[in-house]
Amino acid sequence: STVAVDMLLALLGSPDCTASIDSIQAQLGEPGPLRHHEQTLLQRGFINITGRGRSLTDEGVVRVIDLLEERA
């Protein structure tokens, strides 16, 4: 989904590719919860939940780079 892609892009731009779910939601300006999109990204192995927030996995970084190349 577009929101899931935007979540990946927000994480890519965050220090250490990690951010809290609240900061991701604030960056995206999404009014509702991101839980469904987060679950999709977790199931696909693109993000992890850590003590510091949500973090891109190596697979997530590769996916974001692929998405950016597709957009170019």
Image (tube, rainbow, N blue to C red):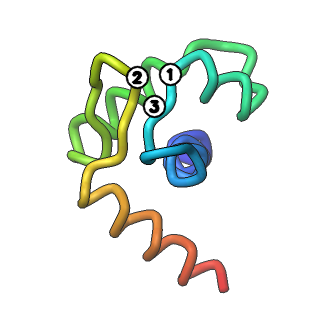
Q: How far across and down, in percent of the image, does residue 26 sit? A: 72, 23
Res 30 → quadrant: top right
As measured in the structure, the alpha-carbon distance from the residue carrying label 3 to the one carrying label 2 is 15 Å
Assign a secondary structure to mark 2: strand
Look at the numbered disc 1 and give the secondary structure of its residue: loop
Q: Distance between the residues labelled 1 and 2?
A: 4 Å
Residue underneath mark 3: 37
Name the kind of residue labelled 3 in the image. Answer: His
Q: Which of 69 and 61 is in front in this view?
A: 61
Q: Is there a contact, CB below 8 Å, between mark 1 and mark 3?
A: no
Image quarter in which the C terminus is found: bottom right
Q: Name the residue under label 1.
A: 20
Mark 2 crowdedness (10 Å alpha carbons): few <14, some 14-19, many ≥20: some
The residue type indicated by label 1 comes to Ser
Image: 51 above or below 17? above
Nearer the observer: mark 3 or 2; the answer is 2
Label at residue 57:
none
Left or right: 53, with 69 as reference point: left
Identify which residue is drawn at 46% across, 64% down: 64
Local SS, label 3: helix
Check disc 2 and report the residue beneath it. 53
Please tell me how many numbered marks the rendered image carries: 3
Distance in Å between CA atoms under marks 1 and 3: 15 Å
Mark 1 or 3, closer to the camera: 1
Q: Where is residue 48 in the image (x, y as percent from the top left)?
A: 26, 34
Estimate the x, y position of residue 39 in percent, counting from the top left: 33, 27
Q: Which of disc 2 and disc 3 is earlier in sequence? A: 3
| Circles 1, 2 touching at the beta carbon (< 8 Å) | yes
Amino acid of disc 2:
Gly
Of 54 and 3, which appears nearest the observer? 54
Please tell me which residue is depicted at 30% across the width and 17% down the height of the picture.
Answer: 51
